Image (cartoon, rainbow, N blue to C red):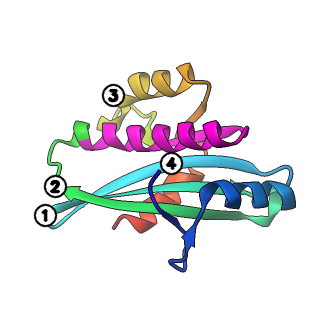
Amino acid sequence: MRLFKDIKGNNIDPVNHTLAVIKNHPSVKIHVGSDSQNVGKKTNYASVIAYRLGTRGVHYILSKSSVSIIDDMWKRLWLEAEHSITVAEWLTKQISVQVEIDMDYNSDEAYRSNKLISATKGWANSLGYKVNVKPNSQIATRAADHHCK
């Protein structure tokens, strides 16, 4: 699994961290999401595990990576789904926990990302995950967006 950090840059073990969050906040809702941005000659990806702490807000950890620029928007966006599903699958195989996947695709057909919803959401649903797309809850992808610029 990739290296995860907190927002201060400290290395975090996602399994131990998630177990601690669950212990302190038994009703936590866990969201996984990824986003990407082309910056210069690189495509930056950020994947986030976000913990919705009831009415106390959201706390998250993240993993960042960069690859040579991906000019093909469809490939870049598909890889966002792959990153999110990989993290969700890894985490749920380590510990028994419910995870929702936030995908940064828009349900409005006016947006090009809409064309990926059927395939990526179907893939995640077939693995047992609830999927959120815009305009619905985007807890993890909002944090990921902030960190991949």
Report the Cα–Cα distance between label 3 and label 2.
22 Å
Graded by Cα atoms within 10 Å as few (under 14), some (14 to 19) or many (20 or more), the crowding at tag 3 reads some
Q: Which residues are magenta?
A: 76-103
The image position of residue 56, as x and y in percent, is 80, 65
Q: Element under label 1?
A: loop
Question: Which is more N-terminal, label 1 or label 4?
Answer: 4
The residue indicated by pointer 2 is 69
The structure residue drawn at horizontal position 58% and vertical position 54%, both measured from the top left corner, is: 49
Q: Are marks 2 and 4 in contact (CB under 8 Å)?
A: no
Amino acid at pointer 3:
Lys
The residue indicated by pointer 3 is 115
The image position of residue 94, as x and y in percent, is 64, 42
Where residue 33 is drawn, which disc sits there?
A: 4
Amino acid at pointer 2:
Ile
Q: Is residue 125 left or right of residue 94?
A: left
Q: Is residue 71 left or right of residue 147?
A: left
The structure residue drawn at horizontal position 85% and vertical position 57%, both measured from the top left corner, is: 23
